[in-house]
Amino acid sequence: MSWQEIALGSAIHVKHGYAFKSEFFADSGQYIVLTPGNFNEQGGFRSRPEKDRSYSGNIPEAFILNEGDLIVAMTEQGPGLLGSSALIPEGNRYLHNQRIGLIDQIDSSILEKRYLYFLFNTHSVRGQIRGSASGTKVRHTAPERVYRVLVRVPDVRTQGKIADILSAYNNLIENNRRRIALLEESARLLYREWFVYLRFPGHEHVKAVDGIPEGWERKVLGSKIVLKYGKALKAENRIEGNVPVYGSSGVIGTHEKALIKGPGIIVGRKGNVGSVFWSDGDFYPIDTVYFIDSELSTFHLYHALLNMQFVSNDAAVPGLNRDFAYSRPYLEPAHRIAALFEETVTPIYEQLFKLKAYNDKLKQARDLLLPRLMSGEIAV
């Protein structure tokens, strides 16, 4: 097996995205405008139902992406995203926006597309892209800079074998992710049925008093929980350990020591205001979030927070004001119904947590294999 060093520009062409106008962004519609936030840091496509925006204006047909298109983040919208690559999961759905490059031409005698996808997610390629990027606060790259990136590659047949191995891990991870999403949705639907539509078991035999089932109480959130502040942790200290570090966008790294014993609920205070996450194990919440410790955390409370409106009209208060959060209405169910809900959804979440743990192991195995396969250290 022979390897050769090439500049990416000898085998690919990167197409600039279109400047879709923000005035036509919408909450729903057929087409979603992609941003660098739609990439995972380690590579791969990231759907964000709570943040993705649709488009209601005129759309140039040349900027509607096809299934399997390879795209690259040209702007570092978040730490580590610059140069990340992703494959489009569905055609006639996503729009090729500015700040994203589309690999619209590949010399198939030099590079295999899936291999190129993994190549963009190696430390060597990412490091070269970051090293040549411009900008201070937000780093940018350009097609001309990507073309200058040097890589060592085997013959195309070997590239295909390497891509097959790594793709098998990705397919398993994606299948588990879909199963996790279905489990999450089943728990959400059950909560809605019981506590929003009030069609809980035995509801036919419970009379309503002042518009709510007898034995239930109208309260405010502050009577139920205490929102505690997370603790600042520098980005360079979020890279080692087994303890998940939570910011308002979810898990943003790992740490050696836990700040809070799990389970616990995390609520976004700054950034993604009002975002809600459940940590089954010990965790480290940073200063952009509040947390609720294990003594008060239940799956019912978790879903109640997911369904709660945390947007304040007080523009003078940045982020989620704690007093405002405490003022939100909270419907306290009868103890029997709350306990039955925990009993019903706990097996769902136990299966979900097992799948997440399995996916973490698959990702670790893939990430250990990737640099060794891509460097030729492991022969295929």
Image: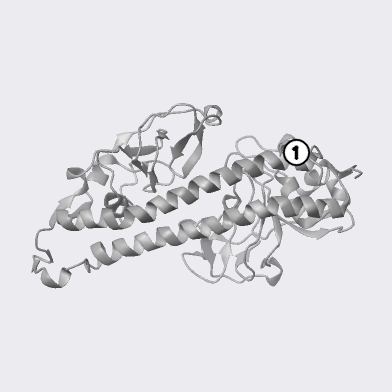
Front residue of 24/353: it is 353
Question: Horizontally, is 145 left or right of 78 in the view?
Answer: right
Question: Horizontally, is 86 left or right of 341 in the view?
Answer: right
Image coordinates of residue 153 in percent, x first then y, are 85, 45
What amino acid type is highlighted by mark number 1? Arg
Q: What element carries label 1?
A: helix
Residue under the image location 47 percent in, 56 percent down = 180
Question: Horizontally, is 167 left or right of 345 in the view?
Answer: right
Residue 380 visible (yes or no) = yes
Image: 57 above or below 360? below
Image: 136 above or below 68? above
Residue under the image location 67 percent in, 54 percent down = 168
Image coordinates of residue 207 in percent, x first then y, are 9, 69
Pointer 1 residue: 372
Residue under the image location 63 percent in, 42 percent down = 365
Front residue of 23/31: it is 31
